[in-house]
Image (cartoon, rainbow, N blue to C red):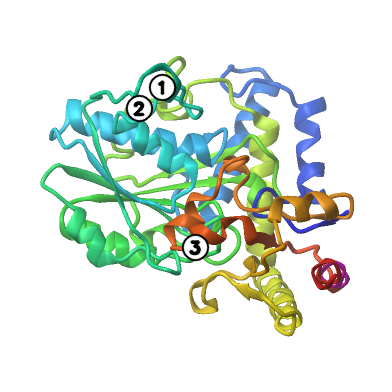
Amino acid sequence: MIYLDNAATSPIDEEVLDAMLPYLKEEYGNPSSKYYYKAVNAKKAVEDAREKVARLIGADSEEIIFTAGATESSNLIIKGFLDYSKYYCDGKNHVITSNAEHKSTLNVCKYLNGEIYSNKDATIALFSANKSVDRGYCASFIEVDENGIVSCDKLEEAITDKTALASFIFVNNEIGAVNNIGLLAATAHKHNVLLHADATQAVGKFPINVHELDVDFLSASAHKLYGPKGIGCAYIKADKYGLPPITALLHGGEQESGIRAGTLAVHNIVGFGKAAEIAIRDMETNRKRIAELDDYLINNISGIRDIKIVISDNFRANGIISLLIDRNDFNNERFIRRISDDVAISTGSACSLGEPSHVISAIGAGKDVNKIIRVSLNKYTLKEDIDLFISYLTE
């Protein structure tokens, strides 16, 4: 199969798998245990991986909290910071995000806003109208422009004296739009508002330094950079006293500085660390290769009638290409199903399966939502893979 759905997940690097295997076979100790060598070795492996992940984003190792993935990281950061701010700090309870975020941010904010209670909210079937509750928090969803970009002006307009946090996606997982996170952080900080970046599609793809960007929080997942699924990290900016207080999402043991309870998945953490190490080593090579493949795909579809890129290349990260097939007889679901034995692509986010894309609606292309497909590349993609995909489009 030709795999062109890398924004959903990337294949695991063989070097990553080799690094993980000993911690599934021989080195199976619990890093929270003491004294005996299997526990000591496991703890050392975790801390080595923490340093590698920190180095990838320009952070200090103490600022990295391991989680099950970026979804958990975003939940931990947004819920945890808002809860601590409201009940233990200055009483601020307002979060700002955009209407084109990943569901892991969008639904957290909707939950805090009292709009939903789960990811498959059944209140519409139980009540005459959607049930709304007061959880003591408030969320604002600002509109993006036609390229999926968040405006600093709109962020500034949405800030109130109760705003504690703003949360925005770095690279949009559906259309590849790249937000100016550094500028958004500077805008937020002017009003004493902290900023969280969902960097799931950015980390490992191009150089990131959290201190240069001046973000306060960041979320990432290993499986977007050729690492294993089920592991990610939350970056929490430290001050001179260490990590700032934040309400834990999971309560239990004192792992991960007391912020994230639960026995650490050492093999996955080791895999994340190795993936981060490889990303640093090969970043420029991979960036150049994916840029060339991106250009190759764009150049080869440019002559095909009724196909265009959804957003301007000036605002898009290489490797995520959202295409509009502007034909009356085209349906993206039917097309993807027809080629699914040979080519893997998607209509958009894997986290929005079965629903129309809210991102496409947010950029004003809602009427074309069933004509849009997403192609996403990886470092193993070949030009021949792109040729086969284009042959199906040409048909």
Q: Quadrant of residue 94?
A: top left
First along the sequence among labels 1 and 2: 1
Q: Earlier in the sequence, mark 2 or mark 3?
A: 2
Q: Label 3: state its secondary structure.
A: loop
**Mark 1 vs 2: CB contact within 8 A:** yes
Q: Residue furthest front?
A: 328
Residue 271 against residue 180 in the figure, above or below: above
* Extent of the magenta region: 384-388
Residue 33, by quadrant, is top right
Residue 131 pos. (x, y %): 33, 23
- Residue 266's place in the image compared with 384, above or below, is above
Determine if the magenta segment contains residue 164: no
The chief SS type of the magenta part is helix
Q: Amino acid at mark 3?
A: Ala
Seen at 63% across and 61% down, the residue is 372
* Residue 139 image point, x, y percent: 27, 41
Residue tagged 3: 365
Residue with the most extreme left position = 161
Alpha carbon of mark 2 to alpha carbon of mark 3: how far?
A: 26 Å
Secondary structure at badge 2 equals loop
Q: Which mark is residue 352?
A: none
Identity of the residue drawn at 84% across and 73% down: 383
Q: In the displayed structure, does residue 194 sit left or right of residue 268?
A: left
SS for dot 1: helix
Mark linked to residue 123: 1
Q: Which residue carries the number 2 mark?
A: 130
Residue 64 showing in the rendered view: no
Determine if residue 231 is in view.
yes
Q: Position of residue 75 (x, y in %)?
A: 42, 34
Crowding around mark 3 (Cα neighbors within 10 Å: few <14, some 14 to 19, many 20+) is some
| Frontmost residue, 46 versus 56 | 56
